[in-house]
Image (cartoon, rainbow, N blue to C red):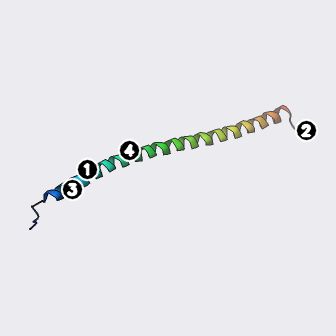
Amino acid sequence: MITATSRPPQTVESLKGLIGWFNHNSIELIEEYRRLEERVDDLKGESRYEVTESKSRKLKGAFLLIAIHVQYPAHS
């Protein structure tokens, strides 16, 4: 008869195996999560860079139009 205090050897070994599997997979999942976090940060950085570049191009275009307008004012 199995009681609360008795542990058949195969049950103990099964539990050890499950704990080992869980620990191994937990470590892999943590590493993958960190890798994905870094990738998200990289993508956010790229996105910010693209937005900054787009704004920079628009500002340069606006300054060029202002410079042309100042240099060659429209006759009223």
Q: Which residue is mark 3?
A: 15
Q: Residues within 10 Å of mark 4 (few under 14, many from 20)?
A: few
Question: Mark 3 near mark 4, Cβ–Cβ under 8 Å?
Answer: no
Question: Mark 2 near mark 1, Cβ–Cβ under 8 Å?
Answer: no
Disc 1 marks a residue whose amino acid type is Gly
Query: Could you say which disc has been placed on residue 48 in the image?
Result: none
Element under disc 3 = helix
Question: Mark 3 near mark 1, Cβ–Cβ under 8 Å?
Answer: no
Q: Which residue is mark 4?
A: 31
Structural distance between the alpha carbons of marks 2 and 1: 83 Å
Which comes before the other along the chain, label 2 or label 3?
3
Residue drawn 21% across the image and 56% down it: 15
Disc 3 marks a residue whose amino acid type is Leu
Q: Residues within 10 Å of mark 2 (few under 14, many from 20)?
A: few
* Near-viewer residue (71 or 55): 55
Which comes before the other along the chain, label 3 or label 1?
3
